[in-house]
Amino acid sequence: MITTRRERVMKTLNFEKTDQVPKDLGGMFSTGISAFAYPFLVKALGFEARPPKVADTYQMLALPDPDVLDALDCDVVMVVADRFTNAFEEPEKWKPYNFGTRLEACVESPEVFSLEGSTNVWTRPPNRYYMPQNSYVFDPQSTGLDLNAEVVLPDLNAYEKALKESLYSDEKIKSITNFCRQVRESTDRAVFVSGICDVAYPPLSGTYMDNTLPLLEPEAFKAMFTLMAEYRVKQFELLLPEIAPYVDIYMLAANDHGIQSGSFLPPSLFHDIYTPFYLTQNEAVHRLAPNLKTFLHSCGGIYDLIDSLIESKFDILNPVQWSAGKHSYKDWKDKCRNRITLWGGGVNSQTTLPLGTIHDIEKEVSEVVAYLKEDSGFVFNSIHNILAEIPPEKVIALYETAKRAGKYI
């Protein structure tokens, strides 16, 4: 018998029998809902209107409130280091900000935004991003990528110095630990922590350089990643034993290794470079916090990389983008069955969710969930975030259908 939502999630992650498929909305920054769509969902659920808390001001994602998680029968809460959570209300952390005339919201730091006219919003330097009036997300200001430019690799000595400086202080560790403890004591949902153990990233330039540079400079890339993995493990050794009693799922990596047709890198090169990098970190996490489950977010058609990711000892793969590449959700499940948990993949977010009818959504979710839940190891979420254009009726149908189709007993 399942006694808590957390138990439902953890049994699922261990491929054990449970009562129903766990469900997630906003456990991390790629399983959420647009801050523009969220107020309509709140209203459709019959709740009092409230300005959305914009947890991710780049993708403009709302932080789902506890009553919304209850209404949609969701089993996971978000914790971002010691910054914020949705396990309980924290009104002192959220300040009102009007994104022009388009959205009354709350953000952590209103001072990072500047308004141009009544609708166009910029973020202030050094991160200069722009959300024009017809957009629902921010984009970086760019003059384009010079494909003929010479690749300048980081100096490893300078990079190691930056890595040392990014290790947490005792005070920071204590702050994160106390916050995670407070979250654990306030909810029976599984605690999904992100934004921790993030050591300095190599100062590479250009779009998707970390995905394409290995083709040009594989040995240099391996040297950078070896160094980064070493310092991430140092960070784990400082922090994970302290927070392990209070958290369940850890966002270890969010690297998009795929595009719509397949993977960025040939599977053999990916295995050569990324498997040792990820394996070093996963083994450290599992040694230091044996009950903590590691999570990889990687968009795109990465079916041919799955064996390498399992060899890397990830516990969870997201977003299960079977809509990309040449393999169905059944192929993904059969490849991963009893080897790695699939988190997401519950509906095609590129076609069915935005373009289909509610009947289409219910039909697809019923079929997908029925197959992916076999042998446990499946947490329901859509393929990536629910976008601004999605009406609340579709969101509600999504989760109600998942609950019906996800029952085991």
Image (spheres, rainbow, N blue to C red):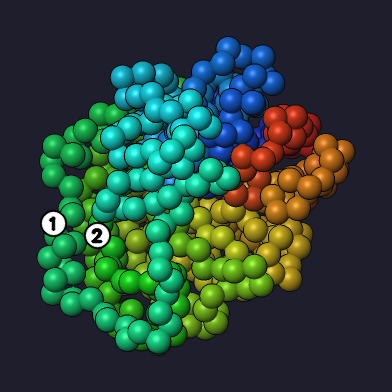
User: Residue 284: in sight, yes or no?
Assistant: yes
What residue did someone put label 1 on? 165
Instruction: Assess whether mark 2 and mark 1 are in contact (beta carbons under 8 angstroms).
Output: yes
Position in image of residue 199 (x %, y %)? 25, 57
Disc 2 crowd rating (10 Å Cα; few below 14, some 14-19, many 20+) is: some
Residue sitting at x 24%, y 45%: 239
Amino acid carrying mark 2 in the image: Ala
Amino acid carrying mark 1 in the image: Glu
What residue did someone put label 2 on? 200
Which quadrant: the N terminus? top right
Rendered position, 350 above or below 389: below
Indicate left or right for 168 with 151 as reference: left
Which mark is drawn over residue 371?
A: none
Rendered position, 279 above or below 33: below
Indicate left or right for 126 with 253 as reference: left
Which quadrant: the C terminus? top right
The local secondary structure at tag 1 comes to helix
